[in-house]
Amino acid sequence: MEEKQRILLCEDDENLGMLLREYLQAKGYYAELCPDGDAGYKAFLKGKFDICVFDVMMPIKDGFTLAQEIRQVNTEVPIIFLTAKTLNEDILEGFKIGADDYITKPFSMEVLVVRIENVLRRVCGKKNRETPLYKIGRFMFDTQKQVLTIDDQQTKLTTKESELLSLLCAHQNEILQRDYALKTVWTDDNYFNARSMDVYITKLRKHLRADESIEIINIHGKGYKLIAPAATEAN
């Protein structure tokens, strides 16, 4: 059975939120509903989502703030804003934060689903075309072949090693949130998977020790940071 695409839905209007969740689930999606931005951020760190749909005007933490915080831990997940605001400066602010689409209220749920489908299709098509090579200090990391190369010496990585290193590279010189990494690579942040990730971090440090300019450091209570002079996509 094909796995349902997962939507993080944040809407403080309880009635509208319930209607949207039910409609999205009837259309074949899994939708997790949160009543405010703070709950939405916690849900994002604990879950694995294909797309986010955020109301802008929410209590505790608004949609723009929520999106900015999520962009600090994940620069790729698509975000659609729902809002009653129609001023150009508000719309421009949403796109500057990194929104993939912006829908003004009132809107039809059919239109929302079409917009979600279009964004997911565009994102999936982009991912299918990309097979990035990362330059990490003196290393080259081929994510498709799962190979690390330095001075003509190659190391074949396991799938978990490759997935974890890819996340670290995508967040180079930034904090990779521990919960997000666990959900992305292991799909579950339980105790045993957390210990397993620590083991894989140790393995990656050994693979990268040939270049002393590279470090993977622990950020207490948060996650890990790959420190390297250049850990960028090379393609």
Image (tube, helix red, strand yellow):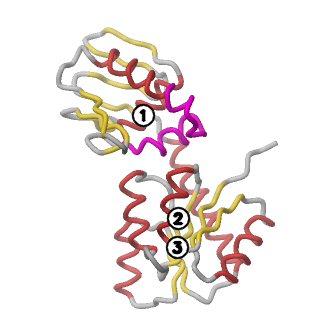
Q: Is residue 183 above or below residue 56?
A: above
Quadrant of the drawing holding the N terminus = top right
Which is more foreground, mark 1 or mark 2?
Answer: 2
Q: Amino acid at mark 3?
A: Asp
Q: Is residue 69 above or below residue 182?
A: below
Q: Is residue 227 above or below residue 200?
A: below
Q: Earlier in the sequence, mark 3 or mark 1?
A: 3
Q: Secondary structure at mark 2?
A: helix
Q: Residue at x 71, y 76 (%)?
A: 18
Identify the residue at the far top of this view: 153
Q: Which residues are magenta?
A: 176-196
User: What distance separates the C-alpha of mark 1 from that of mark 2?
Assistant: 25 Å
Residue receiving disc 1: 166
Image marks 2 and 3: residues in contact by CB distance under 8 Å: yes
Q: Secondary structure at mark 3?
A: loop
Secondary structure, magenta segment, majority class: helix
Q: Which mark is residue 40?
A: 2
Quadrant of the drawing holding the C terminus = top left
